Image: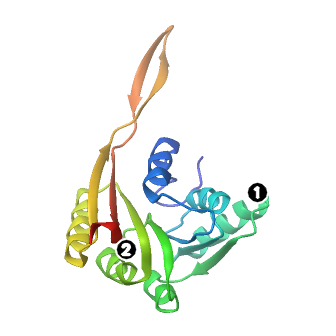
Amino acid sequence: MTTGLKGGSTQDEILAIDMAKLGLLRSDVVADIGCGSGKVSLVLAMRTKRVFAVDRRPEAIAYARSAAERSGVENITFYEGEAEDFLAGVDRLDCAFVGGSGRLAEVLALLAGKVDRTIVVNAVLIQTLSIAIAEMKKQGIFCEAIHVQVARSHDLGEQTMFRPIDPVYIVVGGRSSR
């Protein structure tokens, strides 16, 4: 899916791992921090009670809102602005997914005090990975980091080869590690 948004959408294979690591329940209230295209928010909405989709970029919120409307999804609340401002007004969340890396340490510190179970961070940059692990360890919530490399088949003449997709680091934290 080409969205025209900086950062691109989460790949389906990575999204499957993210959902497994989040361990969602139908009654959950979750946040998608740095929601971008809304792809993750839509999947979260199909599995949970309520989703808060947060992004600082007006064009991302507009795109995600439109995707939700086209899909007929009604349990997503969109918030255009800084994640820290959104989190200041939230008492608690069951789980959170973080796809954006802006002010990640500060966002994770806030999430650590508001998320009851699981936080999953996707990172494509080593620096983002490092910040996520360090802040989760500082908050006493680090569980694991996973390096995922996916390759998809691609035709090469009449033969088939695999073309790799950029690797992704998935960092998982939560209260179970305390």
Give whichever of 77, 49 is nearer the camera. Answer: 49
Let me know if residue 174 appears in the view: no
- Residue at position x 60%, y 46% in the image: 1
Q: Which disc, if any, is residue 102?
A: 2
Pinpoint residue 123: horizontal percent, then vertical percent: 34, 58
- Residue at position x 34%, y 72% in the image: 175
Give whichever of 86, 119 is nearer the camera. Answer: 119
Q: Is residue 172 left or right of residue 139?
A: right
Pinpoint residue 131: horizontal percent, then vertical percent: 24, 68
Q: Which disc, if any, is residue 71?
A: 1
Q: Is residue 83 left or right of residue 45?
A: left
The CA distance from mark 2 to mark 1 is 28 Å
Mark 1 lies on a secondary structure that is helix
Mark 2 or 1, nearer chain start: 1
- Residue at position x 77%, y 64% in the image: 69
Question: The residue under label 1 is which amino acid type?
Answer: Ser
Whether 94 is drawn above or below 90: the answer is above
Identify the image quadrant of the C terminus: bottom left
Whether 84 is drawn above or below 167: the answer is below
Residue lying at the far bottom of the rendered structure: 89
How is the protein colored in the picture?
A: rainbow
Pinpoint residue 168: horizontal percent, then vertical percent: 35, 49
Mark 2 lies on a secondary structure that is loop
Categorize mark 1 by other alpha carbons within 10 Å: few (<14), some (14-19), many (20+): few
- Residue at position x 29%, y 49% in the image: 146
Pinpoint residue 118: horizontal percent, then vertical percent: 41, 66
